[in-house]
Amino acid sequence: MAALAAMPPAAPPDVLIVPGLGNSGPLHWQTHWERDLGWTRVRQGEWDAPVLADWLAGLDAAVRARGGPVVLAAHSLGCALVAHWSAVAPPGAVAGALLVAPADVDSPDHTPDEVRNFAPLPLRPLPFPAVVVASDDDPYLSVPRAVRFAEAWGARLERVGALGHINADSGLGAWDAGRRLLAEVGGPPV
């Protein structure tokens, strides 16, 4: 009897980077990941005056263009976008999501008026595995709200201490700890 040839291991899904309000600047961990790892950034037409319908169309087009399951690496308003888009996500299109410092779009005390059209934030289970990453001193998200989001989305919560908004100002560079969290939801191993 002939031996079966070993199947090559499946390639990890593509990673789509989903920035928030204002996009992610040159020192942001998302930009490091795009530049250093060749991952794809979701492009939006208007970064500073976001319109939910336009951003939904941009994310949907980016996911569909990949032609296979993707892993989403979202930050801030990008997390709210993923929560909204998950209701219309094609089955099997997303292997998992890393949702870092979700912007509390429902709270005028925590987020600017430019994001209010993303409210109310959907609080229903996501159809894919996810990790919500929260900082203890994020000006755009309180810890109790981060806990609420993770519970509602069926996601694991990862608290990372006092890292502000977990952005370029946090001094994370390429943020290897974030890449390890991304691997937990189906991203490439670190």
Image (cartoon, helix red, strand yellow):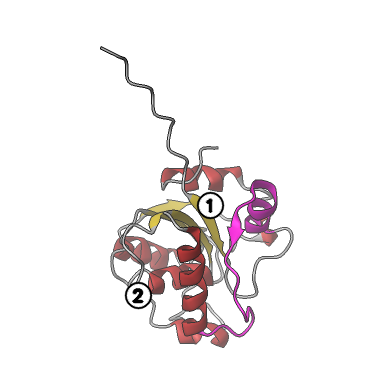
Query: Could you tell me the amino acid type at mark 2?
Result: Pro
User: Dot 1 surroundings within 10 Å: few (below 14), some, or many (20 or more)?
Assistant: few
Query: Could you tell me the amino acid type at mark 1?
Result: Gly
Outermost residue toward the top in this view: 1
**Considering the image in quadrants, where does the C terminus appear?**
top right
Name the residue at 42% across, 44% down.
184
Residue 149 visible? The answer is yes
Which secondary structure lies at badge 1? loop
The residue to which callout 1 is attached is 161
Percent position of residue 186, x then y = 42, 46
Magenta stretch containing residue 35, yes or no?
yes
Percent position of residue 123, x then y = 32, 72
Q: Using the image as rendered, state which of residue 103 and residue 107 is in the foreground.
A: 103
Name the residue at 69% across, 50% down.
173
Q: Using the image as rendered, state which of residue 90 and residue 145 is in the foreground.
A: 90
Magenta stretch containing residue 71, yes or no?
no
Percent position of residue 118, x then y = 45, 82
The residue to which callout 2 is attached is 122
Closer to the eye: label 2 or 1:
2
Name the residue at 60% across, 70% down.
43
Percent position of residue 7, x then y = 39, 29
Q: In the displayed structure, would residue 112 be above or below residue 10?
A: below
Which circle's residue, 2 or 1, is located before the other in the chain? Answer: 2
- Image side of residue 76 versus residue 172, left or right: left
